[in-house]
Amino acid sequence: RQTGLTSLDYGFVNTASTRSAITFIDGEKGILRYRGYPIEQVAKRATFLETAWLLIYGELPSASELEEFDTKIRRHTLLHEDLKRFFSALPHNAHPMSVLSSGVSALSTYYQDSLNPKNPEHVELATVRLLAKLPVMAAYAHKKSIGQAFLYPDNSLSFVDNFLKLNFGNLAEPYEIDPVLSKALERLLILHEDHEQNASTSTVRLVGSTEANLFASVSAGINALFGPLHGGANEAVLAMLAQIRDSGEGVGRFVERVKNKEDGVKLMGFGHRVYKNYDPRAKLVKESADEVLAALGVHDDLLEIAKELEAIALEDDYFKSRRLYPNVDFYTGVIYKAMGFPTRMFTVLFAIGRLPGWIAHWREMNTDPQTKIGRPQQLYTGAAERSFPAR
Ligand code: CMC
């Protein structure tokens, strides 16, 4: 009989690991708010960096605070030249998420003057460095995967435009920013900025609770996000839609396979631990999908398949009784594809979006006097005491 164990909760379905003042979700009603502001308003009215500031510091920035924050981030976009060589050493066919988590982990080796979680100046510097350098490293991972030269950041550009240029520009010709693309990407990144205690944020908190530095904690978060049940779902959705189209099996037959749990197949981009109603982010992404594809002049039959899948699933008892709705990952891939990102970059885009949330939670945890090292209990199911054979 174990002493001290009060409950067993697989997947932390009923257990709060912390208190937090950053993000509010009501999964029954489909409500999401950042620091009290409804996501629908934030996504349409704010910029990515303004939202990052809101999440990290708790209030909207003044115009001068935002300008200073933006300037600092622009000044920190350059990567150490040796770090560039670190990227070159990785295999070209590596998944960009693995490249990214390795790169973030390596930041601890290059920027040793910002590793102390107890020193506010270190924390501030690590915050700015991560926000500035993660998009650059993500673009390196992209360029590496397609065999093109890395570009230097262009600090005259905004956060999102700089990122677009790093991904789609090349050394041979000038790059024109498409405002449709820029606005759409900014909105998608904002929608991903925080989502309270999801698996990757909880990972960042757990690692951070050991007083590990911010780079190490975020690198762990990126690895947690990689999985197909979490951020990796956006990549998996596109693979699923393409498989339905290319196999010619038809949406109806595919849904039957999901319902029969054939080979464990799931409707990727559907279902959520917290939302038992339409994910408010998915609503906004779906609106954007139509707008962006029309504005970019792209027709994608995968969007038609996605809509057909959604329509069938929302009417079906299997999905209705389990309260499964599209989540944020269901339509994002179709937009990222229209923008020109390869499928393997989709989860990397999620990581860039989620970065401010990870930082905000790590900082909140480090300043909460109630914080303790994360150390779950277990229910031991192994052998009772036995004698080791005498030799
Ligand atoms: N397709 C088919 N059945 C599903 C799905 C799905 N996508 N999601 C849940 N179910 C079924 C599940 O099999 C179970 O059925 P039963 O009661 O017969 O055993 C029931 O619904 C409850 O599911 P659960 O697995 O207990 O729910 P959970 O809260 O543990 O898992 C989830 C949540 C998101 C991991 C799951 O819904 C899922 O695997 N979805 C597909 C992957 C996905 O889209 N992930 C992205 C999540 S949102 C953004 C993010 O966090 O990155």
Image (spheres, helix red, strand yellow):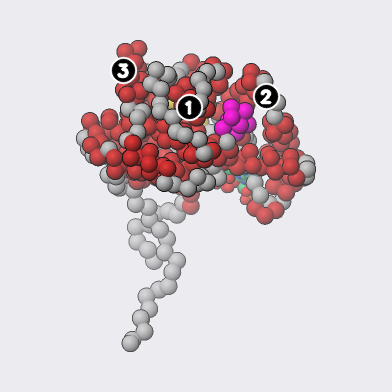
Q: Is residue 101 left or right of residue 31?
A: left
Query: Residue 145, can we see it?
Result: yes
- Foreground residue among 146 and 271: 146
| Residue at (65, 23) in percent of width and height | 293
Residue type (three-letter) at the residue carrying disc 2: Val
Determine crowd level at label 1: few under 14, some 14-19, many 20+ residues with C-alpha closer than 10 A.
few
| Residue at (42, 32) in percent of width and height | 136
- Upstream in the sequence, badge 1 or badge 2? 1
Q: Secondary structure at mark 3?
A: helix
For marks 3 and 1, give the CA distance. Answer: 30 Å
| Closer to the eye: label 1 or 2 | 1
Q: Secondary structure at mark 1?
A: loop
Farthest-out residue, top: 63
Q: Position of residue 98 (x, y in %)?
A: 46, 45
- Foreground residue among 179 and 323: 179
Of the numbered discs in the image, which one, if any, rests on residue 42? Answer: none
